[in-house]
Image (tube, rainbow, N blue to C red):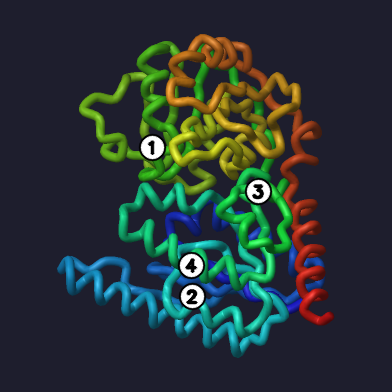
Amino acid sequence: MRIAYITLHLDASILNGGVGKKIQTQINHWQSAGHQVHLFLHSPDNNGFPDSTSFHFVKKISFPLIGSITKELSRIQALANLIQAVREYKPDLIYLRYGLFCFPLQKIFAIAPVVVELNTLDQQEYQYRGAMYYWINRIGRQIILSRAAGFTSTSEEIAQHPTNIRFDKSTIVISNGIELSNFEVLPPTHNMVPRMVFIGTPGYPWHGVDKIIEFAILKPDIHIDIIGYSRNDLKMEEIPKNVACHGFLQSNEYKKIFTTCDAAIGTLALHRKDMEEASPLKVREYLIHGLPVIIGYRDSDLSNRQYDFVCQIPNTENNILEYSEHVYTFAYHMMGKRVDRNLIAPLIDQSLKEKKRLEFFAQIIGKRDQ
């Protein structure tokens, strides 16, 4: 197969994080399986992403009205150029990571069958971005999803949600995975009191970083490292002394912090965007490094399994307060321990997940040729 991979609006902070790693690993596996793949990036940044073609648009202009118009025209022109490049590439299939609709995206559906990757319940998520973006997405998703040849979904919840299932498309559920060979199990710690770590991106209230601060205040003997957030991002007058904010770090930098930690914290507030199930990349990275995890949602690969290295708490607003003693006991119990890689690897190995995805692609192309 000749595959065109398209991402929309992703900036450097996203592409340099877990999402970028996932995209690169997907492409590597598809190429290793003998397929031709090219990544087409629609981005405000010059990312330097390997083996890709970037189409840049203006990120921000100071003048409110003129700036918004200029930015949108720039975004449209960049996407038009991207679509022309995809047309010249002549793919057998287009893989589109779902993003906010932008004119003239509708033209890609005339080039080749399009498989859309669904990563979230987008209508709920765009409610956090204001009325304008909510309605652009509400209208644009109809154009994208009605014309797609099929969907890949990162969870059963997303696949079966009424807003998606109504399009009656061929769908496969493939939870997020990681490339195992890129990570090593870290040595156990020798801490006197537990250290925990959280990694995330500011601006996403469903991460639940505010709950982590509440827990730190309740349990001042547990040290918590927060990666991806600066002190200013937390917007608090006073940060507890047992919390360290490190801001954005490269993987080799935050790995050093992982080495010092006994457990890691996953998503704690998925309920804030009306979701129950997920498969966050950060949790998979914690686990393959050997870090036990605290999660406040139903994990597509981990939940309903009896693992002593997974501390599952309910997906509710007061979960960290109501279960603070449970989390506290778990942190102490996990001191000096690491997750057995052999137990977790078969569940989160991206190579196995990409094999399923490629089989799905072949089915989509086969339907077109019938």
Mark whose residue sits in front, 1 or 3 = 3
Q: Indicate which disc, 4 or 1, sits on the residue closer to the N terminus.
A: 4
Decide which of tag 3 and tag 2 comes sooner along the chain. Answer: 2
Q: CA distance from mark 1 to mark 2?
A: 30 Å
Label placed on residue 8: 4
The amino acid beneath tag 4 is: Leu
Task: Quote the CA–CA distance across marks 1 and 3.
Answer: 38 Å
Q: Amino acid at mark 2?
A: Ser
Element at label 2: strand
Q: Which mark is residue 45?
A: none
Instruction: Tell me: residue 310, above or below residue 114.
Output: above
Could you give the CA–CA distance between mark 3 and mark 2, rounded to whole angstroms? Answer: 33 Å
Residue identified by numbered label 3? 160
- Residue designated by label 1: 246
Name the N-terminal-most of marks 2 and 4.
4
| Dot placed on the residue nearer the N-terminal end, 1 or 3 | 3
Q: Mark 2: few, some, or many residues within 10 Å (few <14, many ≥20)?
A: many
